[in-house]
Amino acid sequence: SGNHSTIIEFLLLGLPVGHHMQTLLFVLFLVIYLLTLSGNLLMIMVIRASSHLHTPMYFFLSHLSFLDLCYSSVTVPKMLENLLSEKKTISVENCLTQAFFVLHSGGTELCLLAVMAYDRYAAVCYPLIYVQMMNNQLCVRLVWASWVLAFLDALINTVLAMNLDFCESQVIPNFSCEIPSLFPLSCSNSSTNFSVLLCSALLHAFGTFFLVFFSYGRIVSTILSITSTTGRSKAFSTCSSHLTAVSLFYSSGFLRYLMPTSGSPWELIFFLQYGVVTPLVNPLVYSLKNKEVKVALKNMLRKSL
């Protein structure tokens, strides 16, 4: 038990590179973080300021932007601090707190992306009753359900991780703390933790993925039945942005949480994609591919000038 009490902090190794390269990485990630904050805040402001964007699709999109703000703010500031610091440490308590919010934010985004897929399914497949299907009350409930389900998932896994004893290597080969990264550091039996995380990841990930797959299966079937080329193009354009966001987040997130933690460089790559790149890219994808958002942005800028 004496050995168990010696580990009070972890070392977030990140990329083991020289001082000059770390300075360059700091500048790069700082620019990305500032662009992420400004892009997502601007998206939220545009949606709130434009009355014609007060629809279910943009209601969910504003929450996605808020989630991306939360996700990047949970991980990137600590990463920036460590890139400039000689002592790249984090206390066990802060590590578990960060791991909780990473899992909570990521889980909520998985649910929200599935909800947005269902919204596109309702819009494309049932356009005449879309307003009745996706009423305001249902939209609010779906968003709250996304937050609550992810909260429970993150809470269960974090509480279990709090019971682990850490007395082995204290090095985490990543920029941030995540639940899977803690298992190799534990000298107590973590098989229960791993089983619970795997089950929750499978239920959470594949449950939401099934809804996305079902929704887009029906959407593709409906689009192919449209005889007009213009109609097909319009129907597909309403879904392409969301499909891009789903592909970016699901691909890296699935692989990160379903693969064994081994300290592989791929773990860093997957983390950077869903934790840094995706929150930056989402507002760009939804604004550049969406005429309504571009018109609303121009109107807002014109009014401010």
Image: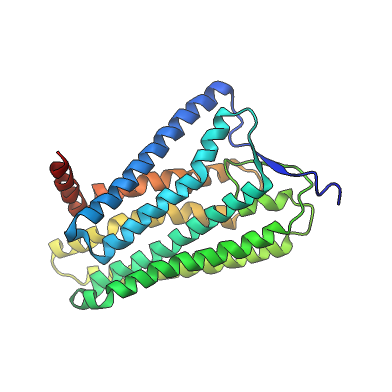
Residue pictured at 63% horizontal, 48% vertical = 95
165 in relation to 24, above or below: below
Q: Is residue 271 left or right of residue 57?
A: right
Q: Where, quadrant-wise, is the C terminus in this rendering?
A: top left
Quarter of the image for residue 134 reads: bottom left
Residue pictured at 55% horizontal, 28% vertical = 84
- What percent of the width, then of the height, locates residue 40? 34, 47
- What percent of the width, then of the height, locates residue 132? 24, 78
Question: Is residue 66 visible to the viewer in this orientation of the structure?
Answer: yes
Question: Is residue 212 visible to the viewer in this orientation of the structure?
Answer: no
Residue pictured at 27% horizontal, 63% vertical = 57
Question: What is the count of numbered marks?
Answer: 0
Q: Is residue 300 left or right of residue 18?
A: left
- What percent of the width, then of the height, locates residue 107? 49, 60
Q: Residue furthest top?
A: 20
The colouring scheme, among rainbow, by chain, secondary structure or one colour, is rainbow
Camera-nearest residue between 71 and 243: 71
Quarter of the image for residue 225 reads: bottom left
- What percent of the width, then of the height, locates residue 123? 24, 70
Residue pictured at 21% horizontal, 59% vertical = 53
